[in-house]
Image (cartoon, helix red, strand yellow):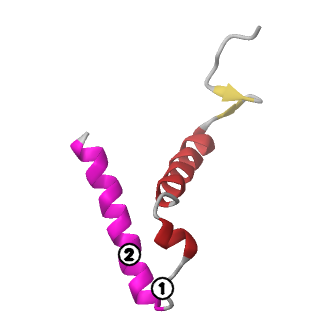
Amino acid sequence: MRPFTNSQDGRALRRYRKRRVIERTIGWLGNFRRLVVRYDRSLRIYGAFFHIACFMIVLRKVVQ
């Protein structure tokens, strides 16, 4: 068994760290059904709810 290293194929895992942050954020946004299903026809309302969802995610992390 190989020991754990900070590289894969000899390359640094910088891309993985960035990708992980993006994938987790998209996963958290997936908990908001209104964003996933896109009930709103207006882009302004959809964008506003997107900002509200982001605020709620940040608020949960801060309160913990």
Q: Residue 19: percent from the left, percent from the top?
A: 59, 49
Q: Residue 40: percent from the left, percent from the top?
A: 48, 85
SS at mark 2? helix
Q: Is residue 47 above or below residue 33?
A: below
Q: Is residue 48 above or below residue 3?
A: below
Describe residue 45's horizontal placement relative to residue 62 as left or right: right
The residue wearing badge 2 is 49
Image: magenta residue range: 42-63
Labels 1 and 2 touching (C-beta < 8 A) = yes
The residue wearing badge 1 is 40
SS at mark 1? loop
In the rendered structure, does residue 47 fall within the stretch colored magenta?
Answer: yes
- Magenta residues: mostly which secondary structure? helix
Q: Residue 33: percent from the left, percent from the top?
A: 50, 66
Describe residue 4's horizontal placement relative to residue 1 as left or right: left
Residue drawn at (35%, 71%) of the image = 51
Q: Residues within 10 Å of mark 2 (few under 14, many from 20)?
A: some
Along the line of sight, the residue nearer the viewer: 45 or 24? 45
In the picture, the disc for residue 62 is: none
Residue drawn at (66%, 27%) of the image = 7
Q: Is residue 37 above or below residue 61?
A: below
Q: Quadrant of the N terminus?
A: top right
In the rendered structure, does residue 28 fall within the stretch colored magenta?
Answer: no
Q: Residue 21: percent from the left, percent from the top?
A: 50, 48
Q: Quadrant of residue 57?
A: bottom left
Q: Quadrant of the C terminus?
A: top left
Q: Earlier in the sequence, mark 1 or mark 2?
A: 1
Q: Is residue 41 above or below residue 59?
A: below
